[in-house]
Amino acid sequence: MIDQDRVVAASREARQAGVHLGMRAGGVSAVAPATVLLERDPAREQATLEAMAMALLQYTPEVAHAGGGLVLDVTASLTLFRGRLAIMRAMRASVRLLGVTAWLGAAPTAHGAWLLARQRRERGRTLRRRVVTMGALERRLDLLPVVSLPAARPFEEWLMGIGAERLGALRRLPRQGLQRRMGKAVLAELDQAYGLAPELYRWIVVPERFSARVETFDRVEHAEALLEGASGLLAQMVGWLVASQQAVAVFALLLELERGRGALPPIAIEITLAEPAWRAEHLERLLKERLARVELTAPVIALRLEARQLAPLAPPNASLFPEPGGNSEDFHRLVELLSARLGAENVLVPVTVDDHRPEVSNAWAPIGTRRPRASDPGQSRDQPFWLLPKPIPLLVRGDRPYYTSPLKMVSGPERIEAGWWNDQLAGRDYYVAQAEDASCYWIYLERVVDGRWHLHGIYA
């Protein structure tokens, strides 16, 4: 990347080819002709920083912009994420989803960590960007070049002339003379880095609604290739959910198609979860299944992710021995995965229907169907669990219904009348009947249609 004809950032491959910071664009073309030169875009850099900040909110609510980078106070999160190394690995992985390579520094002071993260490798010296104690931080900062402090860069030539090449040498100079010669800004940055002055940061404010957009690097014609960009958007949404203490129940990925005379509206991929969730791995798995079933009608040029329906984030179960069967998370995850893979219309769940007829009062409906809660139709409490697919007409012997043997009425009758609204009139008297071997059956006398006895259910 070049800014004002000078290299300000270079990839590992470019550095291996001989490109170094500060080199002119013409020198890059001479040393490594295959290197791609990109002009610096401050607006895009700021948008990337904001996306990184949103994604990192899942590790701490205290994230702030500072000097072209980000500072985070993770003191309260170390136990949750099992230490400094683990949380830094997790943060680096989250940032990598955004297509960004980040340099991380850790120190007891925010400004000290910021300086360690920005240091450059020098020959013959091991690069350490992570310290734990104040003593180790002081020793590490003393070795940094004095121009590491942004406020000291205008005075680089004068500092080199008096032999103050490192921050340790700068600290040993008389403070009053430094203040007269360089102003208060240099000493303020120095004291903040070494923990001698308070650090004040304005933590970013979480927006009330989440909506993030990213442009693709090229015209994408296959939906599965969009997962990489969508993963970065999911990382941002997870950070927003954690910071706002919410879980998402419905979210949508909008695929913006190529513009032009025949421009088409965006393709919306809406995912409804069986249970509100916030973990990136689960949301990404569902989105991957849905993208695999999408056929693009035109190339995609941008992605937008929206959180459409939210729910309060449930606190974790802190009990040592959770109640058996109390956690239905695995079942909900299975239902969501099947819905994403097969389509919500192909995953059915049982629902109740306001109808007194037993064969109609229970039905199957797609998992995403929203039905009002059915009222109690007043069905019999004696109804057996096993209903026959179709009632069986019974023989009558000696004025008694017969099934393997004459049946004896144990309880009943229970009368229902229904179906007049759709010309399927049913007038029945239900009984619990018992055979000679003590087997129990649920039978009814049809009073309207044929006047016959029918077997409708069997008790265990």
Image: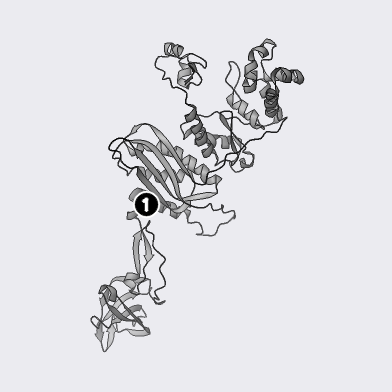
At x 59%, y 28%, the residue is 67
x and y percentages locating residue 298 in the rendered image:
29, 37
x and y percentages locating residue 309 in the rendered image:
45, 52
Decide which of 236, 304 is in the foreground and name it: 304
Q: Residue furthest bottom?
A: 398
Q: Quadrant of the C terminus?
A: bottom left
Vertical position of residue 37 compared to residue 111: above or below: above
Q: What residue is shown with label 1?
A: 339
Q: Quadrant of residue 120?
A: top right
Vertical position of residue 188 compared to residue 354: above or below: above
**Residue 304 visible from this viewpoint:** yes
Other-residue count near label 1 (Cα within 10 Å), few / some / many at <14 / 14–19 / ≥20: many
Decide which of 446, 10 is in the foreground and name it: 10
Taking the image as shown, residue 248 lies to the left or right of residue 356, namely right
Circle 1 sits in a helix, a strand or a loop, which is it?
helix
At x 61%, y 28%, the residue is 114
What is the span of residues highlighted in magenta in the rendered image?
321-325
Taking the image as shown, residue 98 lies to the left or right of residue 315, namely left
At x 52%, y 50%, the residue is 246
Q: Quadrant of residue 451?
A: bottom left
The answer to whether residue 99 is magenta is no
